[in-house]
Amino acid sequence: METRFPFSFIESSRTALLAALAASLLAACGGGGGTGGTGTTTPPPGAGGSTVSTGVMTKGSTIVNGVRFDDTSATISIDDTPKTSAALQNGMVVKLVGTVNDDGINGTAQRVKALIEVRGVPTTITNSTNGQSLVVNSQTVVIDDQTVFSNVAGFGAIQATTLIEVHGLRDANGAIRATRIEDTAAQMASSTLDEIRGVVSGGTGTNPTAFTLGGQSINALNATITPAGASWQNGSVVEVYCSARPNCIVSGVFQASQLKVEEAQDNAFQPSSGQRTEVEGLISSFSLGAQNFSVGSTPVTITSSTRFEEGISTDLANNIKVEAEGSWNGTRLVASKIEFKRSVIRVQGIVAAVGSNPTRFTLNVANHLVNIETGSLTVPPIGPACVQVRGQRKVPATPLVVTASEISGCGNGNRPVVQAPVEAENGSTLTLLGLPIDVSSANDQPPFKNIDGSAMTLPAFLNAVTPATTNAAGVSVPGTLVKAIFDSATNAVMQAELED
């Protein structure tokens, strides 16, 4: 994340680099076949078929990455503890093997495994204006507006004696963004073993007995290896367990009684070459103009044919939550689609107020007030300078709060801008970020733009807009991404563009 002032030089450099990337990717792929960031492109191989999917699930049966999988006949486990489908709950991060129907939104699960990032008793509980977090077995656990609490009356009910099991997604810094916190012993994979799951680093050679996971030193000298004979090294994903509670960490070192090598243990979840593969997670190892990066622990490659939903290619950045969908080429997921799981929105206006909270300010966007949470970013001064915020909307929907991932100077002639998915459509009034915006006054040339930048009429524009809905499988589908540009003097819409 970054704070940038002023706009001109860095933004123009960024634009040039991205243009160069697009050109190089197009050349590498032989040209044609797609429109890069926002156009209509070739879908992944087949709407249906065999698939391997990893992501945060919603109950009903198991909904993951936009597909509702019937799990009634699936083999189900939490960690590697056998469970029934009743044990699968909202907010769990799961691996799933199954088939997707030709409709692309329904399927049948054959295997489902819920993953645990850490289990133990918190040693640090932080509740401050900068956010809520825990430390469990030296793993930083970040709580946000999408964390599901099971049998816990919110963050405030967690005590230093509370045994918790954390489901979540690792960010680029190794912290766990908690998607579910469980404190019910019967629901846990194990209530007797502490656990850390992570990527091995700091080891020497093959099968190191001393290494680190998420910054925690591990001693696996006396650990039972599962499966027997499996090997691991730096870069391997492993799960380590300790049965010596409350003495699992001795002199700063986690004493592992068991070590599971996930690649070997979970061979059934490894995609085969050419198989449809989907993964949800936070981006890491990304640099400006990169073609290759990681989503969670999965290596991903984008091409000139990759299409982007709920955002555009320039929204890619470390710690942005996305779903990558495509096919496995034997070593990487080649993405036909990147969907931003929390739509990347942009608002542009004048800083109207900076309150006592050092991580929040209010942005006036065409006379609409938007609360901005900055996290570690610098709060800009109160106007008259125009400020653009790129970020993601927090839930619940009210009050309107945007968590900033980037703060910069303005484009679009310093005019107010709202770019967000359409939540509702009533005649020529679109609801963006909960704000009713009448686009009928647009009179720029052209007043309405299609995805490819071509001119549209008002009826054609409105006909192309789809509000948020729920599909036939019961999965929420966000609305069309639209950008509204306002007149600085009158606050009326001057131009409306389709961005998705």
Image: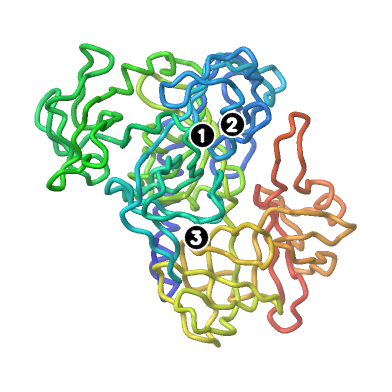
Q: CA distance from mark 2 to mark 3?
A: 29 Å
Residue identifier under label 2? 64
**Can residue 113 be seen from the camera position used here?**
yes
Across the whole image, how many numbered discs are drawn on residues? 3
| Relative to 74, 290 lies left or right | left
**Can residue 340 be seen from the camera position used here?**
no
Instruction: Please state which amino acid type lies under the numbered disc 3.
Output: Gly
**Badge 3 or badge 1: first in the primary sequence:** 1
Query: Which residue sits at x=78%, y=46%?
Result: 466
- Front-most of residues 413 and 208: 208
| Relative to 432, 96 lies left or right | left
> Which numbered mark, 2 or 3, is in the foreground of this view?
3
Query: Which residue sits at x=27%, y=49%?
Result: 138
Q: Position of residue 241 (x, y in %)?
A: 28, 31
Mark 2: few/some/many CA within 10 Å (<14, 14-19, 20+): many
* Secondary structure category for the residue under label 3: helix
Query: Which residue sits at x=49%, y=46%?
Result: 321
Q: Position of residue 4 (x, y in %)?
A: 40, 71
Q: Position of residue 196 (x, y in %)?
A: 31, 37
**Badge 2 or badge 1: first in the primary sequence:** 1
* Tag shown at residue 156: 3
Cβ atoms at labels 2 and 1 below 8 Å apart: yes
Q: Relative to 89, does residue 343 appear above or below in the rendering? A: below
Residue identifier under label 1? 55
Q: Which of the 4 image quadrants contains residue 170?
A: top left
